């Protein structure tokens, strides 16, 4: 095919397509012994799933589903859902927003494609703007979202080895604010700052103070701060440390219904100032006419009647928090005699392992694990905008621990076996 620059860029192999293709192949495999520790798919929590199925049955019996599947919604997304969500956020966090501060999309991935290309890329004066990640590693799905090349700049983190009494060999990435401030001062091409909280892939949750510092820097340089809150408050609420949900007109807060267990409904949420939301709605109108209605309609009553937040608080968060305790205990047991470090688990449902000074790369480990029907994600794909010669970049892997204990144990033991033989 004779493709355009757009076609060439978006059809070439990349980290996220490799991930999704591997997951698809594994899903369709007839091998019952496959260990799936890759991907970001949430667990199917029976109690939660039952609630959603019952709600869907109510929609069908009341004929509301006819409106969902038979009518177009507003380009910014289902208006009733946006009104109810705005009211609930105002009630819970003392914000001052309405439905026109909220835009929906067919999944967070679509939101980030639009947001990154709104604030970075070729500008009308011929200059080029970029997105700054103040803390690497970051979500692999960001990497190929730019319409132009070299859209992303990232700052290497400070690495703190944690002195813990019962949870040995842990570390944490910390924002190097001196480097972030220097980059913003010296490089006038930065169009926006973006950080995820909790962070996919590491489960890192930047502190309220760190978020405030990033917010101050963004306002100082008159650029937006984009916060990816897909795993955070108020839903699904997978944060296991103190963290305050913050928003004002210079923050673009991105949320999702996927991690509630509704990944297939593809519903992303953006909370922003009204100019940005209007722009997102117009882009929706041009690209997809209107976002999917099913996810928002399914949850509107549950948000209005305070059932969803109760479900997150009493079921979803405890489920993943307990999974994290199991994951940490297994890590300490399996890797007790190896120089392997675990990033402190503060949120989401990922283990981020650092094989310090390993003799094989994470990519090689990934390929050897696939041969044994164990799927993880090699870490170098997450260090977007970081030079390839940084050894640490090739010493890390991501594991999704939202699985059963026996599968996680088998996967970790297989990883240990391969690393011990290398």
Image: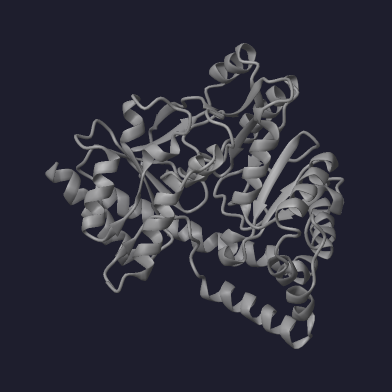
Look at the image and tell me whether residue 145 can be seen: yes
- Quadrant of res 76: bottom right
Image side of residue 112 versus residue 2, left or right: right
Q: Position of residue 170 (x, y in %)?
A: 37, 38
Q: For the point 32% across and 60% down, which residue is it? A: 408
On the picture, is 237 further left or further right than 150?
Answer: right
Please tell me how many numbered marks the rendered image carries.
0
Where is residue 332 shown, x and y percent of the image?
Answer: 30, 48
The colour mode here is one colour
In this rendering, the answer to whether 106 lies above or below 28 is above
Q: Is residue 261 visible?
A: no
Q: Residue at x 59, y 60 (%)?
A: 258
The residue lying toward the viewer, choosing from 238 and 248, is 248
Quadrant of res 220 = top right
Query: Image point 24% across, 43% down: which residue?
Result: 364
Q: Quadrant of the C terminus?
A: top left
Q: Position of residue 214 (x, y in %)?
A: 65, 27
Q: Position of residue 97 (x, y in %)?
A: 85, 47
Q: Residue furthest front?
A: 2
Q: Residue furthest bottom?
A: 61
Residue drawn at 74 percent across, 25 percent down: 124
Tell which of 390 and 411 is nearer to you. Answer: 390
């Amino acid at each position: 095919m004779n493709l355009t620059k757009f076609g060439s860029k978006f059809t070439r192999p990349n980290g996220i397509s490799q991930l999704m293709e591997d997951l698809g192949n594994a899903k369709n495999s007839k091998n019952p012994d496959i260990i799936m520790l890759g991907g970001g798919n949430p667990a199917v929590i029976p109690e939660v799933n039952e609630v959603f199925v019952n709600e869907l049955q109510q929609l069908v019996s009341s004929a509301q589903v006819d409106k969902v599947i038979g009518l177009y919604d507003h380009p910014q997304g289902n208006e009733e859902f946006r009104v109810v969500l705005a009211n609930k956020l105002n009630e819970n966090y003392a914000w001052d927003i309405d439905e026109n501060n909220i835009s929906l999309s067919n999944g967070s991935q679509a939101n980030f494609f639009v947001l990154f290309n709104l604030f970075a890329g070729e500008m009308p004066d011929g200059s080029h703007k970029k997105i700054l990640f103040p803390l690497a590693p970051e979500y692999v799905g960001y990497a190929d979202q730019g319409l132009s090349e070299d859209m992303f700049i990232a700052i290497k983190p400070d690495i703190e080895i944690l002195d813990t009494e019962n949870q040995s060999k842990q570390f944490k990435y910390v924002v190097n604010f001196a480097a972030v401030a220097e980059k913003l001062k010296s490089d006038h091409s930065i169009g926006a700052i973006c950080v995820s909280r909790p962070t996919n892939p590491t489960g890192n949750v930047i502190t309220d103070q760190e978020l405030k510092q990033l917010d101050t820097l963004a306002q100082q340089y008159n650029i937006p701060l984009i916060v990816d809150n897909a795993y955070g408050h108020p839903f699904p609420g997978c944060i296991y440390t103190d963290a305050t949900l913050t928003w004002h007109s210079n923050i673009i807060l991105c949320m999702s219904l996927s991690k509630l267990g509704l990944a297939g409904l593809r519903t992303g949420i953006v909370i922003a100032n009204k100019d940005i939301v209007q722009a997102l709605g117009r882009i929706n109108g041009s690209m997809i006419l209107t976002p999917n209605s099913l996810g928002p309609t399914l949850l509107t009553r549950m948000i209005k009647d305070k059932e969803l937040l109760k479900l997150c608080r009493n079921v979803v968060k405890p489920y993943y928090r307990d999974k994290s305790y199991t994951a940490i205990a297994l890590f300490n047991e399996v890797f007790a005699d190896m120089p392997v470090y675990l990033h402190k688990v503060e949120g989401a449902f990922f283990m981020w392992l650092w094989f310090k000074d390993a003799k094989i790369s994470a990519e090689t480990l990934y390929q050897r694990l696939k041969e044994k029907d164990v799927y993880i994600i090699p870490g170098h794909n997450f260090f977007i905008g970081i030079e390839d010669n940084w050894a640490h970049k090739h010493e890390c892997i991501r594991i999704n621990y939202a699985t059963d204990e026996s599968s996680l144990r088998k996967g970790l033991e297989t990883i240990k076996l391969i690393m011990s033989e290398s």
